[in-house]
Amino acid sequence: MVQTSNPPHDHENQALVLKSATISRLIVLTLTIIYRILVSPYDTSAPLNPPCLTPNNINNNNNNNNNNTLPISPRVASAIENGVVWDSVYFVRIAQCGYEYEQIYAFLPLLPISISFFSRTVFAVFVPFIGHRAVLALSGYVINNLAFVFAALYFYKLSTIILKDHGIALQATILFCFNPASIFYSSIYSESLYSLLSFGGMYYFVSGGSNLSVIFLALSGCARSNGVLNAGYLCFQTMHQAYDAMFQRKRVILALQIVIAGAIRSAFIFAPFIAFQAYGYYNMCVGRSPVELRPWCKAKVPLLYNYIQSHYWDVGFLRYFQVKQLPNFLLATPILSLALCSVVHYAKLRPQIFFSLGFQTSTEEKSCGVVFLSDDLSRSKVAGTVEKSSVRVEENFHLTRRKKLMKGDKVEIPIESEPAARPGYLSASVLPFVLHLGFMAGTAFFVMHVQVATRFLSASPPIYWFASYMMRHHAKCFRWGYMIWAYSALYIFLGSLLFSNFYPFT
C-alpha cells in the first residue's frame, strides 16, 4: 500500500488518459444525437411529465410553475428530454419529485441528489430557456460525463500502483475509456458516479489513505447497491493483517485492534445503503395499518431493495434460465467470457496464491507492498524498498525478454521464467480484485438479468488489466487485440443506436 514515485512520463500518460476519456464521451454523445435524428424511437413517451404526487414537494412546485410558462427554447428542451429513456426516467423523476412509489426505491439516491443540487445551483439559469425537467436531464448528462473523465484518471492511477507497469496501465485505461457499456456512462445512469467513487476509493485504499478510501467506497454504495461489495477489499486486508499480527508477529492485542478497526470501516461502507433501506421502511411501513402493510414490511429483516428486485423485476437465483432469454445470454456472452478467462487465467498461473487466498505469498512479494498485507505499522518499514524492488523486478523481466530475442527465441516469456514477484496482471496484488470480479460475474450469470452483465462488470478493473496483459504479452496478441477492440466498437455503436431510441440493450 505504498505508492511509488511517478516517472517523468507519467504526467504525459495522465494527460493522454484525460484526452482519451473526453474524446470517447464526445464520440458517444455525437452518435446518440445522430441516431436520435435518423431513427424513430420505439417509445415516444419520454417527454411525458405528470405532476408530482406530493403536493408540498419543493421540486413539484417548481415544476408546476414551469409548466405554466413555456420555455424560450422548446426545441432544445424537447431534444434534451427525448434522451431521458429507460432507467434515466426514474433518476430524473426522483430528482424532481422524490421517492413516490415502492418500486422506485430500487434506484439509489446519490445521482438524483446530485442532479437536483446542480439543477438548483449551477444550471438554474437555464430553467427559463429549456424548462425544469430539461435542466434536470442536462445536469445528469454533465455530471455523468465529467465523472467518467475523472473515473478514468483514478483508474489509471490505481492501475499503475497495482500493476507496476505504466504501459499496461495506460492501455487498460484506454480500454476502459472505450468500454462496451460506454452508452450508460454518458447517459443518466449511475455507472459513472459509481466508477468514480469505486476507483477513487480503491486508489486511496492501495496508496495508504484508509479514511478517505472508506468515504469514497461508502459513497459508491449510495450510487449502486453493489458498492457495498467494496467492503470486501477491507475485509480481505483485515483478514491478512490480523493473521500476520497473530501468527507472524505473535501480537494478539494488535490482531484484535486490526479486526475491530476493519469491522468499523466495513460497517461504515455498509451504512449508507442500510440507511437508505431504513428510509424506505419509514416511508412505506411506519404509521400504516396492518391491512396496508406490504409483505416485506412484515419480514424479520425488512429489506425493501431485495423485495423490489424479486417482485418487480423477477431477479433471483436461476430465474432467468429460460429459453426465451437465450438472446440476452448471447448479448452478455462476450463480457462474461472475458471475466471468466481473466479469473481462470490468474488461477491457473498463480494457483498457490489464488487457492490459498493470498496466504501463501513469497517474501519478495510481501516486501513489495502487497495491498492485502501492508498496513500503517509496516509501511515505514517497506517504504524504502518498494520502489527499488518493483523496478528491479520489471528490469529483470525485460532483460530476460531481450536475451530471448537475441537468441532468436519467441518473444513470449514462459511464466516459469518470470521472477517471483511479478509485475502486471499476475501480481499478487491483483488477487482481491480477481476474487471480487469472480463473485460479481457469478452473480450476474446466475442471479441477475444476464444482459445487465455488460454494464455491471464494466467497472471491474481486472477486465481491462487482463485484456491489456493478453494484448501485450500473449503470442496471439494481434488476434486478441483485434477481437477486444472490435467487441468494444460494436457495442458502442450498437448501444448508442438501440439505447437512445428506447430499444432493448443490456
Image (cartoon, helix red, strand yellow):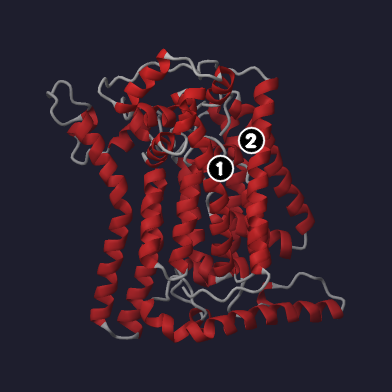
Marks 2 and 1, the one that precedes in the sequence: 2
Does residue 193 appear anywhere in the picture? yes
- Position of residue 236 measured from the top left corner of the image (x, y, whole percent): 39, 65
Pointer 2: what residue?
A: 29
- Position of residue 436 measured from the top left corner of the image (x, y, whole percent): 46, 56
Write the residue at 12% across / 24% down.
290
Write the residue at 48% across / 15% down.
70
Cα separation between marks 2 and 1:
10 Å
Q: Quadrant of residue 300?
A: top left
Relative depth, front residue between 431 and 179? 179
Label 2: which secondary element: helix
Amino acid residing under circle 1? Asn
Pointer 1: what residue?
A: 145
Is 390 above or below relative to 113? below
- Position of residue 328 measured from the top left corner of the image (x, y, whole percent): 57, 32
Q: Are marks 2 and 1 in contact (CB under 8 Å)?
A: yes
Write the residue at 52% across / 47% down.
147
Q: Residues within 10 Å of mark 1 (few under 14, many from 20)?
A: many
Write the residue at 38% across / 21% down.
63
Is 23 above or below relative to 259? above
Amino acid residing under circle 2? Leu
Does residue 458 appear anywhere in the picture? no
